[in-house]
Amino acid sequence: MMQLRIGQGIDIHQFQSGRKLLLGGVEIPSDRGLIGHSDADALLHAIIDAVLGAVGKEDIGHFFPDSDQKWKNSDSSNLLDHVWTLISSEGWQIVNIDCTIMTEAPKIAPHRLQIRESIAKLLKCKVDQIGVKATTAEHLGALGRGEGLLASCVVLLELKEKAS
């Protein structure tokens, strides 16, 4: 019998001038980036929480606590690689991932394919298994004022059948 699991992840970070903006492992041209203990790649953080949640594991903060200087300025691609190595070694594989980025600026559409390709490469799956959409907050609240960015992700995983 095929076993499927779904997981959801959400991450939100505040913008700060002078930082690089990384989304899905891709540097997005911008005069400001996201504040965080690591490189603050909110999209990869949402994906990490989604895959961890799908298999019933602790969240990103358990694996990479911001109280541990070991993870200070970490490349989130490495964090995802660590988590995905653990999860895939248990037999899980990606069915699909669907992500949404909410921000007033910068525009995500010109970078969508590159972000999808980056995530697919990190998770060793096909680009058509990765969806990336963008929306705005319609000028409502802190996100609408351009103070930050929110990334959300839903993942569907399948447990590979063991050869008998």
Image (cartoon, rainbow, N blue to C red):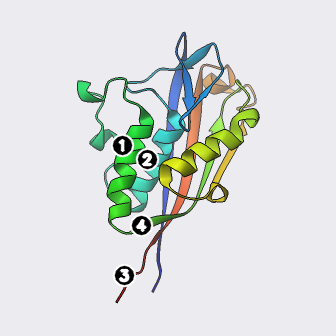
Note whether residue 115 is visible. yes
Q: CA distance from mark 1 to mark 2?
A: 7 Å
Which residue lies under the disc numbered 3? 162
Q: Residues within 10 Å of mark 2 (few under 14, many from 20)?
A: many
Three-letter amino acid code of the residue under disc 1: Ile
SS type, badge 1: helix
Residue 48 marker: 2
Residue type (three-letter) at the residue carrying disc 2: Ile
Give the percent coordinates (x, y) of residue 125.
55, 58
Q: CA distance from mark 4 to mark 3?
A: 11 Å
63, above or below 7, in the image: above
Q: Label 1: which residue?
A: 60
> Does label 2 or label 4 sit earlier along the sequence?
2
Relative image position of residue 2 (x, y in whole percent): 47, 81
The image quadrant that residue 51 belongs to is: bottom left
Amino acid type at circle 3 is Lys
Q: Between disc 2 and disc 3, whose residue precedes? A: 2
46 in relation to 127, above or below = above
